[in-house]
Amino acid sequence: MNTPEISFLHIADTHYGSNWSKRVRNRQRKAYGELFFEKSERAINNALIKHNIDFIIHSGDFFNRSKPPPEVVDRAVNPYIQAAKNNVPIYILPGNHERSKLPFGLLHYQNNFHVFKKPSSFVFIKNGVNIQLTGFPYIRHNARAKFNSIVKLASNITPLTQPQYKILVLHQLIEGSRVQHYVFRKGHNVIPYRKIPRNFDYIACGHVHRFQFIYQNNNSNNLSRIVSSNKYPFVKQNHVNRCYQLLNKSGTPLVQVNEPIIAYPGSLERVSFMEREEPKGYIIGNLFLSDKKDSIIKAEYQFHQLNAIPMIYEDWNLSDNPIKDFVYPLLKKLRDISLNTISKTSTIKGVVRVRIKGGTNISSSELDVLKHEAEKLSFYLTFSYTP
């Protein structure tokens, strides 16, 4: 296999500061919050060493809130500072959890650090190839109506150099994007697929935490439909004829399209229980040059999966069954997960949420046993009660 001349890392929705608090007393919750920092450090270091990346794209929701504590900022930016010092430019788009002015502290003073504070474009030059990155902060209201004009504005703010490869960086809901069993089709803030510009080579998206590639598939009835899939972790692009192929894990081509693939890498770690069955990771993009080294002939994009924290969600209805009928099966499940956890170095083995409803006499002794054992096994456990 040929060695790519240019490579990049595409991540999104890191949500630094999630479940983090300076005063948090729950040891497991604190460990859960630490995972968001640890995952990024691991992903960025791996991308630098293993994939030899040349630049980083972050498609929004860098922080979990608009005004994170200074300790969160310092911890979050550390791996990016190391990348910038290694002459790896970083391009960050503000998401819906933030504002266009992000509190990055000393990272602002790094020459290789770029933020899409407003609709704008940047150019990255590597091996004589001009790569243009175009983007704008999250559109908060009526994105469907505003999208085309903002993309046009951002695209027109370009350097004089003619780009050979173009990336559009977005933090929006795009038609066909999926979370669990729900597919976004319509709405004031859902961007129709037809509005995505076709003159970009790669659409680097954030906002949806599920890894997925979105494309338009034409069936035998000549009816086009927008498809979201996380079954195909690999995409090949013929840059000359602008043809894209989606491949399965074995490398077998399964789908071919003639329009840019829309890529959501998803979050690096599970942020909510809606994501408990989703794979987590990042995308590496590789660009290959012609023999004369004067043009891009093809590109490849691959999703790289990371170990994600196990999440368990249970509904207990005590109207029909005593609480012990729920507690002890859950305890067995936690022990099994603890024994089979791949990462033995993690200080947390999983996150558990139990919703209890019904019943008039809730025995505290069984709950105390569960709480004690969950803490002992390093699980972050929370309860909610519904009459």
Image (cartoon, rainbow, N blue to C red):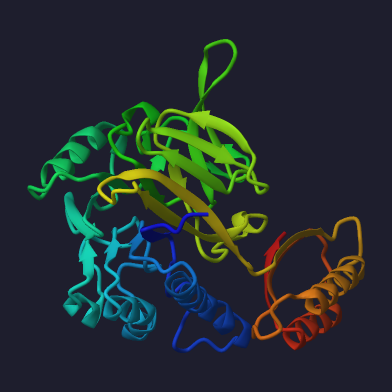
**Is residue 230 found left or right of 237 in the rendered image?**
right
Give the percent coordinates (x, y) of residue 236. 49, 42
Numbered marks: total: 0
**Is residue 101 found left or right of 218 in the rendered image?**
left
303 w.r.t. 33: above or below: above
Q: Residue furthest left?
A: 160
Give the percent coordinates (x, y) of residue 16. 42, 72
Give the percent coordinates (x, y) of residue 43. 49, 71
Give the percent coordinates (x, y) of residue 326. 87, 66
**Is residue 64 found left or right of 1 in the rendered image?**
left
Q: Residue at x 52, y 36 (%)?
A: 245
Name the residue nearer the viewer: 115 or 166. Answer: 166
Q: Residue furthest front?
A: 292
357 w.r.t. 151: above or below: below
Q: Residue at x 55, y 83 (%)?
A: 30
Classify the position of the C terminus by image quarter: bottom right
Occupied quadrant, residue 162: top left
Name the residue nearer the viewer: 21 or 162. Answer: 162
**Is residue 208 found left or right of 180 in the rendered image?**
left
Q: Residue at x 45, y 59 (%)?
A: 3
Occupied quadrant, residue 66: bottom left
Asked whether residue 184 is in view, the answer is no
Asked whether residue 193 is in view, the answer is yes
